[in-house]
Amino acid sequence: MEVHHHPDLHHRRKHFREYFLEFLMIFLAVTMGFLAESLREHFGDKEKEREYVSSLVQNLKDDTAMFHAIIQANKEKMDTLGLLAGLRHKDLNDSASRRLLYKYARKIGYYSMFRGNDATLLQLKNSGGLRYIRRDHAADSIANYAVQITYVYSAEQMYIQGTQAAIDAAEEVIEFNLPRDGGLDAWPVFAKDPHQWHVFFNKVYTEQGWTGNYVRNMEDRLPLAERLLVFLQKEYDLD
C-alpha cells in the first residue's frame, strides 16, 4: 500500500523586519533606477545645451562680421548720396557738375542689407531648445538678441522703400541707357522741369535719411551681438 505525503501548506509567518527589508530593497531599486535615468537626462541635456551654444557662438561671429561690413558699405552710400544731394543748387548744364551727377548717381539704388545667421535661433525657437539653456541669464540674453534683430529687419523696409523712390525719381531726370564708349561729357540731362529736379533731390535726400536710420539700427544692435558672443564664450569656455 502506497503512502502519499502531502506537502506542508502551512508557511512560517514572516516577521515585520523581513517585510520591511523587502520593501526597502524594492524602494532602493526603483529609486536607483530613477536616479540613473535622471542622470542620463541631465548629462544629455547639458550636452545639448553646449551644442546649441557652440552653434550660436559661430552664428554670432558671422553676425558681427556682417554687421561691420554692411554698416561700412551703407555709410559709404550715405556719403555719396550727400554729395549728390549737394548738387541741387549747381548748374547741371555745366560739364563738371554733370560729370559729378552721373558719378554720384551710381549709388542710387544701391542695396547692402544685413542677413543674420539665424539658423540656431530658429532651431531653439521651433524645437523648444531654449529649455536646455540653463546658465544664469543665458536664455534671457539669447531671447533678447532674437527680438532685437527684428528691429533691424523692420528698419530695412523703409530703407528699401526710400531707395526705390529715389530710383523712380532718377529715371525721370537722368539718362541710364548710355553707350558704353560714350564719354562723360556726352551723358545728357534731359529733364527741363525744375519741379522734376526738386522731386529728384528730395528723394535722394530721403534715401540718404532712411539709409542712415538703417545704419543706426544696426549700430545699436552690434554691441549687443558682441557682448552676447563674449558672454557665451566665457560662460561655456568656448573659443
Image: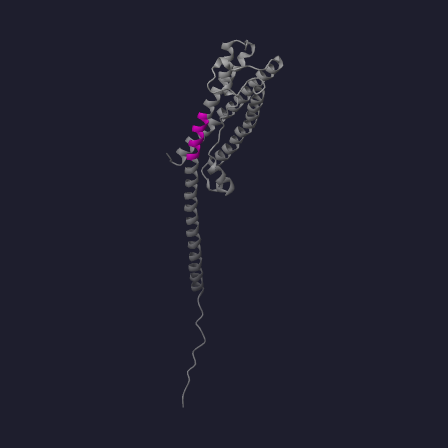
Q: Nearer the viewer, residue 40 or 13?
A: 40
Residue, x 55% and y 23% (percent of image)? 163
Front position in the image: 54 or 103: 103
Q: Position of residue 22 (x, y in %)?
A: 43, 62
Q: Is residue 122 magenta?
A: no
Name the residue located 46 percent from the left edge and 29 percent from the top edge. Answer: 225
Quarter of the image where one finds residue 17: bottom left
Quadrant of the snapshot with the C terminus: top left
Res 226 visible: no
Picture quadrant where residue 92 is located: top right
Majority secondary structure of magenta residues: helix
Q: Quadrant of residue 227?
A: top left
Seen from the viewer's position, the closer of residues 86 and 220 is: 86
Q: Residue at x 41, y 49 (%)?
A: 40
Residue 69 location (% of width, % of height): 44, 25
Q: Which residues are magenta?
A: 57-69
Residue lying at 56% horizontally and 9% vertically, measured from the top left: 89
In the rendering, at what x and y percent does residue 85 appear? 54, 14
Which residue is farthest bottom? Answer: 1
Q: How is the image coloured?
A: one colour
**Is residue 76 at least partly visible in the picture?**
yes
Q: Quadrant of the N terminus?
A: bottom left
Q: Position of residue 47 (x, y in %)?
A: 41, 43
